Amino acid sequence: MFAITAARISFDDPVSGLEAGERPEPEPRDGWAVVDVRAASLNHHDVWSLRGIGLRESTLPRILGSDAAGVDEDGNEVIVHGVVGDPAAGDGDETRDPGRSLLSEVHEGTFAEKLLVPRRNLLPKPPELSFEEAACLPTAWLTAYSMLFGKADLRPGSTILVQGAGGGVAAALIRMAAQAGHRVYATSRSEAKRERALTLGAHATVPTGERLPEKVDAVFDSVGQATWAHSLRVLKPGGAIITCGATSGDAPPAELSRVFFLQLRVLGSTMGTRAELATLIEMCARTGLRPDIDRVLPLDRAREGFQAMADGELFGKVVFTV
């Protein structure tokens, strides 16, 4: 079968490690399902894997990708939950299982014609969602959903800031937060991305690091080092930072005196549970809320999508069709 693999690790030139070509088809096993992939979406996780974060050279080649929608062996249209873990090991939450992984880390990923995945990781795809839209939900949108509705403890009408408006998680946060009735501010270095954030439902946007018109109840930060100080400064007393990544580096000054004096909360969030993905899918089907897709490419042009992500040229998701 045709697949996109990580063949080499290069921190400085991650896209150079990509290879496209034939790989063995997955062999069925008890408790697992083979899915004919119809669409798969790209995440920053895939680029970081090519940099050696989460992947070791000794495990290569590895098929990349953690998001997919397709058709199972029984002809059912399905969405794939990308977290492979044991809910019992995490008190009912597979994201808390110390041995959890994402597809493409331990098991082969979704950028292929066929995918082998635990059967419990399959959820029905509603007819309201296209395969391309459905493939965007399991990582970026699920991460945003879990941050916003599972971790932040906000009520409708709250004021929030989304750092780095161009990313897939950030775009999902703006969409869902506006839908839920929050007043949303967003930042970006790019004027074009700030304009796009307004079309997604942001109340107002500012260049990265600049003063906001008011303090906010919560900040959603996946940027890390470059925005951390700003995120702390814009919070109301008792406010929260919810972080799901650190694309600019993970070692900013903690500013603990500000954290304890203002009684701020710092919350980490990784992906989301199967149950959260089910409710996210239902929300999209009922409300008409849809992921923002920057471009759709056939799988054999995956390198173009990887390069655009590495260069920061995206607003929304890159989807590969099979």
Image (cartoon, grey):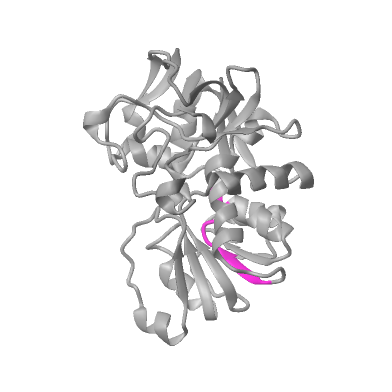
Give the residue displayed 59% in from the left and 34% down from the top: 135
Q: Nearer the viewer, residue 123 or 59?
A: 123
Q: Nearer the viewer, residue 236 or 11?
A: 236
Which of the 4 image quarters holds residue 259?
bottom left
State the residue lying farthest toward the bottom. Answer: 261
| Residue 255, horizontal then vertical, whole percent | 36, 77
**Above-or-below relation of 257 to 201:** below
| Residue 217, horizontal then vertical, whole percent | 59, 74
Q: Which residues are magenta?
A: 158-170
Give the residue displayed 64% in from the left and 71% down from the top: 159
Does the magenta-highlighted stretch encompass residue 160? Answer: yes
Q: Is residue 192 visible?
A: no
**Above-or-below relation of 254 to 110:** below
Does the magenta-highlighted stretch encompass residue 58? Answer: no
Q: Quadrant of the N terminus?
A: top left
Q: Nearer the viewer, residue 76 or 321?
A: 76
| Residue 43, horizontal then vertical, whole percent | 48, 40
Q: Quadrant of the C terminus?
A: top right
| Residue 34, horizontal then vertical, whole percent | 51, 20
Q: Is residue 98 visible?
A: yes
**Above-or-below relation of 204 to 14:** below
In the displayed structure image, the side of residue 85 where residue 168 appears, left or right: right
